[in-house]
Image (cartoon, grey):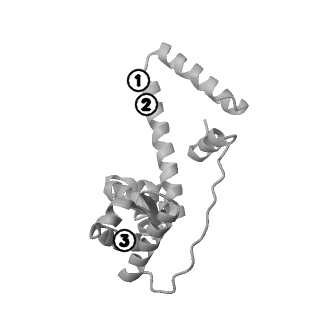
Amino acid sequence: MPGWTGFNTYLHNNMSISLTEIGYLPILDANPTEMSTVNTILDKSLKIADELKLSTIVVVMDQALYCKAQQIRWSNKEYEERIILRLGEFHTLMSFLAIIGKRFRDAGLEDIFIESGLVAQNSLNGVMNGHHYNRSIRAHKIMAEALESLRWQSFIEQTDKTTVDIVNTTSEELHLSYKNKTF
């Protein structure tokens, strides 16, 4: 069975994706961290929603702008009702990585990363707080796969032979279906 990335590649390899048109708005020549600039972005977003005859519009922002936009949104009833603010995927994932790092760092995750050679000592803080994004994603994927492998190994060791045979047969069928892409 392939790992996370391989599994999703197999799973979505022949999936048809509908065409989406993405356009860019004119550049605002203003400091993006100013509240007035963020307010202008929200106001222009509502105008776009009106032109498209949408009752609501989704606005995706990075972490610094998201905080300011939420403050403005909460103080304006129309913004609150019509604008759906979303933190961008990159910053959302960085936050999740930081939460995992904070929660499990002292529970042995730090030691496993270093002692396995998965993460160098000097890179550890960046991996644990999600700021070394690529290294952090790689380390967490490998850790998840290792834990899943240990879980299966423990399950097999504690299960009766009939169940083990069923699991092995099912695993083999699943493995063959991946090779043939018939799943």
Inspect this view and state whether residue 121 appears: no
Q: Residue at x 39, y 69 (%)?
A: 66
Amino acid type, label 1: Gln
Q: Which residue is depicted at the point 72% across and 30% down? A: 180
Q: Secondary structure at mark 2?
A: helix
Residue 43 to residue 163: above or below: below
* Left or right relative to 109: residue 177: right
Whole-percent x, y for residue 77 in the image: 29, 65
Specify which label sits upstream in the sequence, 1 or 3: 3
Q: Residues within 10 Å of mark 3 (few under 14, many from 20)?
A: many
* Residue at disc 3, secondary structure: helix
Q: Residue furthest left?
A: 75
Picture layout, residue 99 above or below residue 150: below
Crowd band around label 2 with a 10 angstrom C-alpha radius: few (<14), some (14–19), many (20+)? few
Residue 117: x and y, percent?
51, 58
- Foreground: disc 1 or disc 3: 3
Looking at the image, residue 28 sits to the left or right of residue 81; the answer is right
Instruction: Choose between 175 and 91: the one closer to the eye.
Output: 91
- Kindly identify the residue that appears in the image at 50 percent across and 19 percent down: 164
* In the image: residue 118, left or right of residue 77: right
Label 1: which residue? 158
Sooner in the amino-acid sequence: mark 2 or mark 3: 3
* Mark 2 residue type: Ser
Classify the position of the C terminus by image quarter: top right
Q: At 40% across and 74% down in the image, what residue appears?
A: 64
**Mark 2, residue position:** 154
Q: Position of residue 150 (x, y in %)?
A: 46, 37
Query: Is label 2 or label 3 in front?
Result: 3
